[in-house]
Image (cartoon, helix red, strand yellow):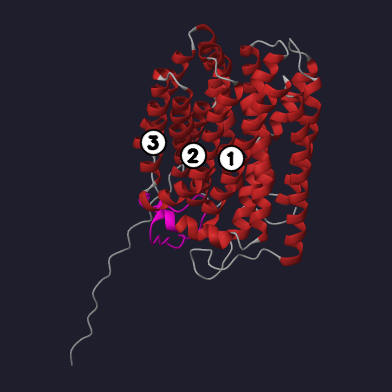
Amino acid sequence: MNELTTTPVADPAPPRPAPRLHYAWIVAAVSLVVLVGSAGFRSAPGLMMDALHNEFGWSHATISSAVSVNLTLYGLTAPFAAALMDRFGVRLVVVCALLTISVGAGLTVLMTASWQLILCWGVLVGLGSGSMAGAFATTISGRWFQARQGLVTGVLTAAGAAGNLIFMPVLAALVEHQGWRTAVVVVSLAATAVAVPVLILMRERPADLGLLPYGATEAPAPQVVDGSAIARSLRVLRGATRSRAFWLLAASFAICGATTAGLVGTHFIPAAHDHGMPVTTGASLLALIGVFDVVGTIASGWFTDRFDSTRLLIAYYGLRGLSLVLLPSLFGESLRPPILAFVVFYGLDWVATVPPTVALCRRHFGADAPIVFGWVLAAHQVGAAIVAGLAGLARDSFGNYDATWYAAGVLCVVAVGCCVALRASGARGGTSQPPGLGENGEGELLTVGDSGGS
């Protein structure tokens, strides 16, 4: 009888110790740098409006049309950029986008006709900056974080304000003392420089480093991406348009864009200058809005992790409308307490709408939320583009911007109505997802960062 023999089993390899600093925070830091730069690059046309008008004789409406094209392409690029990031990788898409901005800004120094401004700053810078729009922040927070998604989305969104804070005073001083050409050369060089940390430090997913997303206890299901990025983006849009929630989110976010980037971001400086305020002072106030926007947006991300997103949006749009209606009476030749109060109040509200809007996209559209938010962001930018152009026409027709501030206040009331309808719809129908959305094929919804109540 043969004796039963056993083969000793080697001890399993010890588990890999968790790093003190999760690499998700490094990716978030690189993303922050990218978004800071992208926002700063887009701020230049508002600073150059008077300089271009004086040198070339172009009207405010003509210069604003380049901003309108920029804002439109910024929004329309976002959903396709989200799909391209899924297919070809975040690093490749972002580096190509930064180089496109660099080329567009650099070629501006050679322009002699208004159509060249539209091509360089409208088309090229619009396409480049749109590839790093809100869908980028949503992609990063969704891939790398399970915990703190709302907070990280808020921080990355606030990077836009930080970009204005860093670039606006510098570019304003360059435009005033060195000329607008020097300012755009600085933008071109900065866009190229920002690409360096992306090439060195950006990674696609936690699994590439043998990690789980921050706060996760198990690995997420692998994402399967079939077909072209364009086809996927359009397929997701087709499914999303069957949902009432999509149209309400898109409409309210279009008004958000109209009352921020389209109006204040583009026309605040020339409007202040109409009242005798120096361009550098107006730029400093806009940068100060950015300071408080950083605080407000990060706080909004924290609130979004804890409170109902529709209630937050109702409060944000209502307060914004009130501040814009009061703005025409606050302008003056010098800094006074009323205009400083507006800067603080409006700054806290500037893009505080983004974290709850992203959370609502996750609630209603699950794994396709980054692409759906890209389309919602497209509506945001279309609204911004329309108002950027109309405000320039109003300034040429009436000699001031007063009518645009009052109209913006009315639009905010409409946005409040959209959010009330969205809340009522959610209360009646729950958080249903349209057919065909979701990567897992089972209709599972992601509710991270938005519990639906306080």
Q: Position of residue 436 (x, y in %)?
A: 53, 67
Q: Hey, what amino acid is under mark 1?
A: Gln
Q: Nearer the viewer, residue 378 or 366?
A: 378
Whether residue 341 is in magenta: the answer is no
Mark 2 → mark 3, Cα distance in angstroms: 17 Å
Of the residues shown, which amino acid type is indicated by label 2?
Gly
Kindly indicate whether the residue at mark 1 contacts the one at mark 3 (C-beta within 8 angstroms).
no
Secondary structure type for disc 3? helix
**Residue type highlighted by circle 3:** Val
Label 3 vs 1, first from the N-terminus: 3
Asked if residue 218 is positioned above or below residue 73 in the image, the reply reads below
CB under 8 Å between callouts 2 and 1? yes
Q: Residue at x 54, y 23 (%)?
A: 45
Q: Residues within 10 Å of mark 1 (few under 14, many from 20)?
A: many
Can you identify the residue that label 1 sits on? 381
The answer to whether residue 116 of the structure is visible from this angle is: yes
Q: Residue furthest top?
A: 177
Residue 390 marker: none
Majority secondary structure in the magenta region? loop
Q: Secondary structure at mark 1?
A: helix
Residue tagged by mark 3?
A: 198
Q: Can you say whether 286 is above or below 123 in the image?
A: above
Q: Is residue 305 visible?
A: no
Residue at which label 2 appears: 130
Query: Could you tell which of marks 2 and 3 lies nearer the N-terminus?
Result: 2
Residue occupying image coordinates x 76% and y 45%: 414
Region of the chain picked out in magenta, as a range: 206-231
